[in-house]
Amino acid sequence: MTFDQIAWLPVCAGATGVGLVLSFLLLRRRGAAAGLRLAAWSLLPMAAYLTGALRTLWQIGTAVVGFVTGLVFNPFVWAGVALAGLSAVLFLVSGVLRRRRRGAPATAAPSTPAVRRAGRGRAVTPGAPGPNATQPLPRPAAPAARKPPAKPADDDFSDIEEILKRRGIG
C-alpha cells in the first residue's frame, strides 16, 4: 500500500479524537499529569498531518521496515554478520597471543651500564663527568619504596569492617 492510497485525514483525526477521550478518562482516574501527557501524545497525529510531516514519517517507516526485512531474510547479510563476528574473535585471539609471546614484563635492568651521547658522538656513562664539566653528572635517584597510605583515624568504613569481622565475614 502506498502513502497516497490511504485517507490520512480521517485516520489522524480519529487517532487524535480517541486519544483525547482516553486522556480525559485518564485525567479523572490518575490525575492531571497523566491526562495531560496522554493529551499531548494524542495531538501529534493531527499535527503531523497538518504540517505535512506525515509523508516523511511514512518514508522513514518504510525504509526501516525494508532494511530490517532485508537484514533478516538476506543470506548475504548473515554471511557479513558472521564475518564481522569472526573478525572480532580473531582480534581477541591475536591480543591474547601477543600478551603470551611477550612473557613476563622486563623489569630487570640490563647488565651493562646505560650509555648516553654527549655531543659530537662521544659516549658517556652515567656518573662520569660531562664533556665540559669537572664534576660528575648526577645519577638518577633510585625510586623510593612506596609506603601504603596511612589510614585516617576517622575511617568511614571502620564500623562496617568491625561488624563484618564480628560476624566472621571477610
Image (cartoon, rainbow, N blue to C red):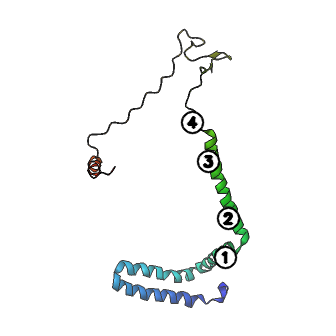
User: Which residue is under mark 1?
Assistant: 69
Q: Which mark is residue 105?
A: 4
Question: Is disc 3 placed on a helix, strand or loop?
Answer: helix
Q: Amino acid at mark 4?
A: Pro
Query: What is the distance, in whole Å, between disc 1 and disc 3 at their CAs?
Result: 37 Å
Question: Is disc 2 placed on a helix, strand or loop?
Answer: helix
Of pointers 1 and 3, the one earlier in the residue sequence: 1
* Image location (x, y in percent) of residue 63: 66, 75
Of pointers 3 and 4, the one earlier in the residue sequence: 3
Of pointers 2 and 1, the one earlier in the residue sequence: 1
Whether pointer 1 and pointer 3 mark residues with C-beta atoms closer than 8 Å, the reply is no
Q: Residue at x 42, y 89 (%)?
A: 21
Which of pointers 4 and 1 indicates the residue nearer the eye?
A: 4
| Nearer to the camera, 84 or 29 | 84
Which of pointers 1 and 3 indicates the residue nearer the eye?
A: 3
| Nearer to the camera, 76 or 49 | 76
* Image location (x, y in percent) of residue 170: 34, 49
Query: What is the distance, in whole Å, between disc 4 and disc 1 at their CAs?
Result: 51 Å
